[in-house]
Image: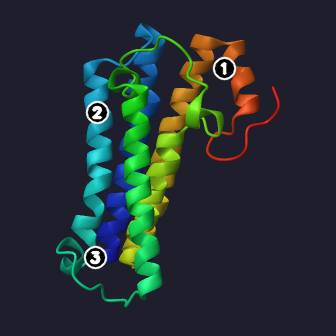
Amino acid sequence: MKLTVYFASAAVLVIAALVVFRIFVRRDYKQTGRLTTFSSFLELLVWGAYMSFPYLYNPPEWILFLSPDVPVGETLRIIGIICILAGFITAFGTMFWFGPYRAFGLQVDRLIQTGLYRYSRNPQIVFGSLLVIGTFILWPSWYALGWVALYGIVSHIMVLTEEEHLRDVYGEEYVSYCKRAPRYLGLPRGS
């Protein structure tokens, strides 16, 4: 029963992400060139729902940071902690460096192509995935693995909408940037 509820909840979350990112956010980008407060709020709701999954579906020990049902060796525990810390610090550090208005689509003034953006057009997504993967390493379960997959799906839906908008705003500059910097991770290609 719990697995059925999990899959149903995951399907609802993916549908909500599609509606929010591909309809509301996309409409805002087309009509105003930025996100409205309402669409930003909807995005936060989608991500808040996503972040609640481990608390809803993993065992209570996960929430209390006690030993997981599946024993994790010390090496994996250290790797998991490093992934979580590196993901958290870098994802939110990049957003801070980027600026809150730009990070949440409220201001679009220039195309950022320096720093981590040379290696990824979406460093927050890449490093956020480290946080999610680290969580899976520390508390392995089928539910946690599903959480990793959900992160990839919801993030990708958001990224597709943002890329469409950036192509509209920056035109050839963005297309050239896409040729140099990979969508998620990789070495920059020649100018």
What residue type is disc 2 on?
A: Leu
Assign the N terminus to one quadrant of the image. Answer: bottom left
Viewer-proximal residue among 119 and 133 = 119
Q: Which residue is mark 3?
A: 2
Q: Position of residue 120 (x, y in %)?
A: 61, 39
Query: Which residue type does callout 3 highlight?
Result: Lys
What is the C-alpha distance between the residues marked 2 and 1?
Answer: 26 Å
Tell me whether the residue at label 2 lies in contact with that at label 1, contact meaning CB atoms closer than 8 angstroms.
no
Q: Quadrant of residue 38?
A: top left
Q: Earlier in the sequence, mark 2 or mark 3?
A: 3
Mark earlier in primary sequence (3, 1): 3
According to the picture, the residue beneath numbered tag 2 turns out to be 42
Q: In the rendered view, does 97 fall on the left or right side of 188?
A: left
Which dot marks residue 174? 1
Residue 72 versus residue 63 in the image, above or below:
below
Q: Quadrant of the C terminus?
A: top right
Q: Which of the two marks, 2 or 1, is nearer to us in this view?
A: 1
The x and y percentages for residue 113 are 61, 25
Q: Secondary structure at mark 3?
A: helix
Residue 15 x, y percent position in the rendering: 40, 46
Residue at the spot x=49%, y=61% of the render?
Answer: 149
Picture quadrant where residue 173 is located: top right
Q: Nearer the viewer, mark 3 or mark 1?
A: 1
The colour scheme of the drawn protein is: rainbow
Residue at figure coordinates x 31%, y 89% from the top left: 69
Give the mark toward the camera: 2 or 3.
2
Q: Amino acid at mark 1?
A: Tyr
| Image point (76%, 30%), residue name | 179
